[in-house]
Structures are given as structure tokens and as C-alpha cells.
Image: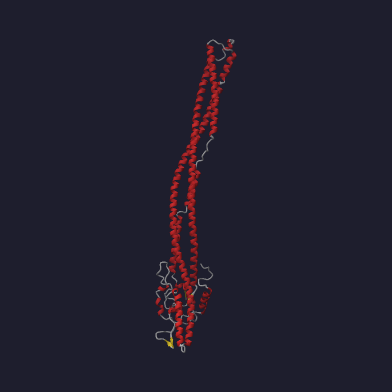
Amino acid sequence: MSSPPTETRTEQPPLVSLVLQSKKALQHGEQLCSKANSLTNASAQCAVDVLALDAKVKWASEAVIEQLKLAASVAKSIELRRSQLERRIREWDTIRSQHTTALDNILEALGAQLVPPEFHQTSSDSSLFGSHDSIDKPNGICDPRLSPSATLRDHQISRKTRQNVDRTRWKTLRDFVDEAAIEDVLDSVESERTRLDDIMTTTYHYPETLSNAVSSIRESLPISGAYPPINPILSIQEHTTIDMARHLESLTAHYEQMASALHDSETGEVFSEEDLRDMNRDTEELPVIMSELEESVKAVETAHEKLLTAKAAAEEKLDASSSILDDLDELGEIMSDMLEKQQEVEGDCEDVLEGLQQRLQVVQELHHQYVLYQSSFNKLLVEIARRRQYREAAEKIVEGMVGQLRAMAEEERQVRDDFNAEHGAHIPADLCLCIENPPTRWDVVPLPGDVRETLPEIDSDLLAQAREKLSTGDVIFPATDSL
């Protein structure tokens, strides 16, 4: 190499200074590359941790979802079982309405049917259905045969004039019905029905409570995989570290070149001005390289921080999943209690419904008895009218037909026995006490001990109404459907 002019050579930085700058840049570059390598390794481990944590969160979420499906099915099951009970209760209510309506209608029909005073005038406080102060049967139905006025038939019913009769003061068939006993039966039905509602109310909120709990837990479930893309982050780090390695190789080569030049200079070699300019130019490029290395390290750090943030989020989600699993265990215990309580409610409802069904049977029996009561009373009116016709016919032929009258009396006795056997059980003992009387026996005059038969007066319109009801089958109540 030719020696440059002295004044020009003195303007260039000393070669030693260039070597020191190159060495310093190399050392700093090695530190940056070492830091980037450490961050890259940590990022790789962090990425593995994120994937592992995310897998746990996903597994926990799937387990929770399966349990929530079970909880939802339990809520549906409870709701279905409640719906079945409610349907049965509605059916019972319909039947109850039919029975009570039928009972009300027959009672109204009884209240519209007049009873001639001669049928009960010798006993001011007698009841066709017994005393209103006592109930002889457990179901509240009074036995008409146990009336306290059963001895009424021992007395003769006197006949009164029927001119200008005020029927507004007449009693009706309903006046001989024990209203208090009926009210007791209906009150007991209503009381049990209210108790049934109270039992059903205890589990009314169960389906909604379970559904709300399921929805709340489902909404609080962490979303699996909601993290920054890991592969692109690692790829960026990889490309960045590769570029840093290239820069580090450049720094190493530059330092070796400068150290070799310094060694050659110490051995007496003289460099040309152009060589020195090249060395200075390469050295001046070191800050640019170092700046790129620092930017690369920042990029690696940024990527690492993203992974750390993702890891923290995954850990937080895992903690939330653990808390949700605890809530799910508590929900499981609540569901068990709910199912047990629902089973208990169903058992109680079955018992109450069975009791209500029995009470409805009592209402139905009341209705049936009063229907027979009305029917038998109408037949009683017809029977009294028939007996009056018999008596009048007997009186006309008594003087010359003693033998025939005895035969007729025997035949009449049989007819009456048949009537009493068929209808006597349905007629209260204190209603028309003469119904059990035997026919009058004639031997020109009444036999010793016999009296002339006296029958209650029955107005023609009442008799016509009774015959019409019997002929049309309208013995229950008019204009109302029968059960």
C-alpha cells in the first residue's frame, strides 16, 4: 500500500478507536441477541403453558356444559311433573264443578216444589232429613229413618178447609233438607282444595330457579381459545432472531476485520486512504445495526408480553372455571333437594287428591239421594191420589160388597207393601206418616180398632205437576244437563 499524505492521514480516526467501537458494538450485540434468545425460549415455554391452560379450560367448560344439560333436563322434568299434577287438578276441578252444580240444581228444584201442610202440620220442627243439629253419618248425610218425629204416624192428620189458601207460607221439599250438613261437606271440600294449592305452591318456582341458574352459569363460562394467535407470534420471534443472528455475524466479521487490521498496522503495514475510508464507513454503519438489533429485541419483548398476557388470561379463566365447578357442585346438591321435595309434593298431592275424590263421592251421593227424594215424593203424591180414589170407590160399595172389599183390601195391602218396599226407604220417616197405614177393612162398618182412613189433601195442580215430572222423567231439575 502507498503511504497517504501526512495531513490527510491525521484527519482519520485512529485505527485503535475503530477497533474499540467495533468491539463495543459486538459485545452489545451479543447481549441483545442473548436477551432475545432468552425471551424466545421463555416465549416458547409460555406458549406451551397457554395451550395447556386452554386445554384445561376447554375440558372444564365441556364438563360444565354437560352438567348444565343435566340440570336443564331436571328443570324440564320437574316442570313436566308439575304440569301433569296441574292437569289432574284441573280435571278434578271440572268434575267438582259438575257435581256441585248438579247438587245446587237439585236443591233449587227441591226449593221450588211445595209440600202441602197436611204432610207435616202435626210436627212444627220435624225435618225430612233428621235434626239439623246432628249428623248421623260420617259424610254428613242424615238418615231420614232416624228422624226425631218418627212417631208422627201415631197421630191422625186433621183435614182443613182449602179455600183461599196462602201458599207463600207453605214449606218446600228443601225445608226438610239438612243445609248445615251440606255446607259442612262443601266447606271440607274447599278446605282440602286450598290445601292442595298450598302444597303445589312450594315447588312453583323450582323450574324457573333452575333455568335461571343454568343460564347464569352458562353465561359466566370462559370462552376457550380467545387468545392472540400463538403461531404468528412465535413465527415473528423466529424471523426476528434470525435477522439478529445475521447482524451479529456482521458485527463479528467487522470486529475480526478491524482487529486484523490493527494487528497488521502494529507489524508495520501502512493502509491506504481508501482502506481507511472503507473502515470508517463500516464503523459508521454500526449504530444503524445496533438500532435494528434494539428494535428487534423490542419486537421479541412485545411478542413475549403478548404470550404472558395470554397466559395470565388463561390462568384467570382456569380459576373462573374452578369457581364455576364449585357452583355446579352446589347446584347439584340443590337439584337433589328439589327432586326430593318434588317427590314429596307429588306424594302429598296424591293423598289430598284421593281424599278429595272421596269427598266428591259424598257430594255425588248427596245429589243422588236428593234426586231419589224428589222422585219418591212425586210418586208419593200420585200414590196418595190413587189411595183417595180407592177410598171413595170403597165407600160406595161397602154396604153390599163386604166380601169383595176384604179381597180388595188384601190386594191393596200387597200393592202398598210393594210400594213401601220399593220407595219407603227413600222417604223420610216423618214425611206423610200415613204411607205405612194398611187399607181400611170393612165389615159393613170399620172393624173394631180400625179408623176411617184420612189422607192429606193434594191440590190438583200439584198432582198434575208430579205426574208430568214422572211421565217426562224430569225428576231432577228442569233445563239442566244431568251428570
Q: Nearer the viewer, residue 426 or 126?
A: 426
394 w.r.t. 280: above or below: below
Q: Tell which residue pokes out farthest to the bottom in this image.
A: 400
> For the N terminus, which image quadrant?
top right
Q: Nearer the viewer, residue 27 or 350?
A: 350
In this rendered view, identify the residue nearer to me: 172 or 328.
328
Which residue corresponds to the image point at 44% horizontal and 86% vertical from the top-left?
A: 442
Counting from the top left corner in percent of width and height, residue 343 is at 44, 54
Task: Name above or below for residue 419 compared with residue 47.
Answer: below
Q: Position of residue 81 (x, y in %)?
A: 48, 54
Q: What colour scheme does the image use?
A: secondary structure
Is residue 124 placed above or below 352 in the rendered structure? below
Report whether 117 appears left or right of 238: left
- Residue 454 in percent (x, y) is at 45, 82
Above or below: residue 282 compared with residue 466: above
Q: Is residue 273 visible?
A: yes
Could you say where residue 22 lies in the image, as x and y percent from the top left? 53, 19
Can residue 191 be seen at all in this image of the molecule? no
Residue at 49% in and 49% down: 73
Report the number of discs.
0
